[in-house]
Amino acid sequence: MSADPWLEANNLYLAASLRWLRLRLRRLNPGRKATPSPAPSSGQRRSWFGRGAGTEPLLALPPQDPADAIRHAAEERTAAAAMDPPPALMLLAGRLGLTDFERDTLLLCAAMQFDPGIAELLTEAPGAAARPGQPQPLGFPTFAVAMQAFDEPSWDAQSPYRPLRHARLIEISHAGAMPLTASPLRADERIVNYIKGLNAVDERVGSLATALNDPGAPQLSKSQSAVADAVLKRLRTSAGEAAVPAIQLLGADPVSKLAVARQVGDALNRRLHRIGLDALPAGKAELEEFARLWQREAVLLPLALYVDAETIDQAPAETSAALQRLLGRNLGLLFVARRDLPEGGGRSAGYAVEVARPTVSEQCEAWLGVLSPVLAADEAARTAGLLAGQFDLNLPDIAYAARLAQSEEETAGTLRDRVWDTCRALTRPRLDGLAERLEPKADWDDLVVGDEAAGLLRQIAGQVRDRYQVYEAWGYARQMSRGLGISALFAGESGTGKTMAAEVIANELRLDLLRIDLSAVVSKYIGETEKNLRRLFDGAERGGAILLFDEADALFGKRSEVKDSHDRYANFEINYLLQRMEAFSGLAILATNMKTALDHAFMRRLRFVVSFAFPGLPERKRIWQQALPEEVPKDTIDYDRLARFSLTGGNIHSIAVNAAFLAARAGDKVTMPMLLAATRTELRKLEKPVNEAEFR
């Protein structure tokens, strides 16, 4: 007995349908001798239809009047169809809207695969197509045969807009001037397997759109589940519409968008298949073929399509055009994941929803869930707040970071430090030359600035560290929609320690420091500068990296009077930068030695302005003492004398390095004459007056 009762019943229905079909075909050639052909062995019947397919030989003609025999076979077929669920052929006809004539025509084409004797019957049938190259030519089914064999033939079944051809249920070998009605027909292999009861995704579709077989339910926060519920409500509202609207999932986190799509698909009992932009067929004919096959698969199987269009902005024009053509087709449940809604996207774009990562509070709650079992309650709460306030992660990333940190050896630091470093590496932005990641090495002892500047720098570090406490726990985030980030201006002459101060803050906070490459960010092409800035801010925002705009006056300069289109677009860039700075939730540092060149609108948006004054005599002495590391062999150095030279910290560092190379070349210690010689060279480089009396 078959392990699947439905499959056994489906085989019985097929056997009855083939007996009925053979009688129909025999009636087309009444002159054919009605001697029963040898029946296939029981083993053959099991191979084609499974055990119990019937004891009557499939090739035998019942010893009855032909009309009575056909009527009797039709009654047997109808009785065999009374199963729940219905046979595969009946399901297919119902789902694709086939008429009885179209259903039987499809059976005629598929029967060639089930019963080799059908080809012999078609050999002498009027209107059948001959198979060329055979010693004894065998027939192929045609529309002409179907119209003679079945009741209520319909001419429009041949139409390319009817399901037989539109859904690619059959293939037509239409050669030369051969009439369509006389062209050989062949059932599609996928459809033959479906009729037999084997319902698997067409490999032509599966090779492009891969199944997402992630185990377990998707991990969503409450806010993300609310988005999924809104999508489900919209789909149920549009249930009576002719076409299901495409769901445009917008946002910066692909993982969260995919999780929302999975939850919607699970709720509708639809298996999700993903296709990337690189897999989209570029040619119109190939894309049309894929669309029709997918439409068919969405009916035969409960499927949903997820188009990964995250990189559509960087895609070539033909890829964008292919995506638009695909969206113009009714593909059933369709998700399109992209960063933003395209220009002009309205009703034609479908239903657009924003999918963000979990809120900061939800991330903190998730961190508490994974840290509470391994840390004390107070430490877990404090660590969860710090991580949620600094890193913007989805729920799978939070769980992954916690597992990875716990699996590392304890020699790598405390669990809190390991989790922090894991999150830092996980969210490190890939900016492709737009910024240089600096490795912070300097600490507070290395920084020589005035007391006021040092105090402001410590305030900046403290606000970055405690922003979860103030914004989330104390409710400021509910009152402020913008300005949650921290922006600071470091103003002072070149070499006064602005970049070092940024390194000290990054080192204190254990965050990445990204120095922006203005030459790579600023583009002469309209709109490219804004795209580059957006990538910078988005990348830094997620990972909590610190952005350092060195020589910021080149990018944050004053807006000019509009005299031509170049001025207008330059002002657009500054306006965009103003808006993006205000919306940025991380720490952005603007360093400049031309404070007055900055646009006044930026000054209003800055939370801190730190002035780096020219170092005085005591500061210069400290800088000289720190400029020569302990490992450097040195003679007696007169730091008071060196401090009398009016130089910044950057100049002093250059002098110390040059003197060290002089000592290395001479194979000697660093001496005062070497330092004085390097100082003379530095002053001449700066075009400052050199008083030789100071060097005696």
Image: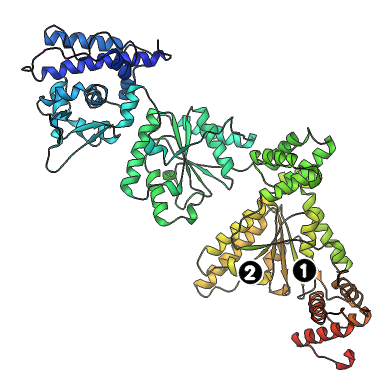
Q: Which residue is mark 2?
A: 555
Q: Is residue 635 left or right of residue 64?
A: right
Give the prevailing secondary structure in the magenta stretch: loop
Name the one closer to the observer, 554 or 294.
Answer: 294
> In x, y percent, where is residue 97?
30, 26
Q: Earlier in the sequence, mark 2 or mark 1?
A: 1
**Which residue is rendered at x = 21% and y = 13% of the image?**
39
**Which residue is rendered at x = 83% and y = 39% of the image?**
379
For label 1, the SS is helix
Q: How many marks?
A: 2
Q: Is residue 666 above or below residue 306?
A: below
Is residue 330 in view from this perspective?
A: no
> In x, y percent, where is residue 80?
30, 11
Quarter occupied by residue 683: bottom right
Amino acid carrying label 2: it is Leu
Name the one closer to the observer, 645 or 190.
Answer: 190
Question: Which span is picked out in magenta?
Answer: 34-39
Task: Identify the disc placed on residue 188.
Answer: none
Q: Which residue is mark 1?
A: 498
Asked if residue 50 is among those painted magenta in the image, a careful observer would answer no
